[in-house]
Structures are given as structure tokens and as C-alpha cells.
Amino acid sequence: MSKAIYEIPNVTYDMHKTELTEPIIYILDKYDLTTNATEINRVKELWNKGKSIYYIADKLRPTQRGVTEVFLLLLHMVEENMIKPRGGKMWGA
């Protein structure tokens, strides 16, 4: 049995110029994925102090979805080299 290998090109699509053959599904649309420099700086400060993702979420996004939103923000910040991985991972030092 052979494995199917799918190569997905790293391409940005302009959805207004794309002829759609099926509906677009927006993922994670129930989350607030917006941020600003003040929030990023606060997350970076708390992360560098060894605070857990739960602590950071409680301070910045005290909602039911806050932990997920902070996780996604931390993921973004790691991908953009704004923070570095640490010993305690996201659970804190």
C-alpha cells in the first residue's frame, strides 16, 4: 500500500480573484485573533517571567476562549521569533 504525499505550496490566494467551486470555510472564526503592540509586549513580559499560559490568559483574555487565543498568539510569537522556547514550555517555569 503506497502512501499519498500531498505537497501544499506556500501561496497566498486573493479570494476575490479566485473562482470558487465550493464555499469557503473560515477556521477559528469564533476566536478573537486580533492583537496590538501593547498586548504583545505584555505577553512577552509574562512569558519571560516564566508565567503559565493559564496565568497569561487570565491576565489578558479572561474569557472561556482566552487560553486558546493566548496559545495561538504564543504560536505566532514563536513563529515570528518574538519569544524563545523555554524550559517549562507553555506551562511555566
Image (tube, rainbow, N blue to C red):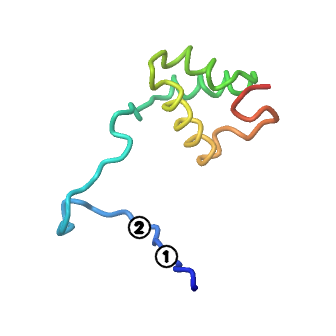
Q: Which callout, 1 or 2, points at the residue further toward the start of the chain?
A: 1
Comparing 52 with 60, the one in front is 52
Q: Is residue 24 above or below residue 63?
A: below
Q: Give residue 61's position: percent from left, percent from top.
A: 48, 19
Q: Secondary structure at mark 1?
A: loop
Q: Residue at x 45, y 21 (%)?
A: 64
Q: In screen coordinates, is 81 left or right of 9?
A: right
Q: Quadrant of residue 59?
A: top right
Residue bearing mark 2: 11
Q: In screen coordinates, is 24 left or right of 67?
A: left
Residue type of the residue flagged with mark 1: Tyr
Q: Residues within 10 Å of mark 1 (few under 14, many from 20)?
A: few
Comparing 87 with 13, the one in front is 87
What whole-number distance in Å separates the C-alpha atoms at marks 1 and 2?
Answer: 15 Å
Q: Residue at x 59, y 47 (%)?
A: 80
Q: Secondary structure at mark 2?
A: loop
Comparing 4 with 73, the one in front is 4
So how many labels did they put on this image?
Answer: 2
Q: Give residue 69's position: percent from left, percent from top.
A: 48, 31
In which quadrant of the rendered image does the C terminus lie? top right
Residue type of the residue flagged with mark 2: Val
Q: Which mark is residue 6?
A: 1
- Closer mark to the observer between disc 1 and disc 2: 1
Q: Identify the residue at the far bottom of this view.
A: 1
Q: Give residue 35's position: percent from left, percent from top.
A: 44, 30
Q: Identify the residue at the far front of this view.
A: 1
In which quadrant of the rendered image does the N terminus lie? bottom right
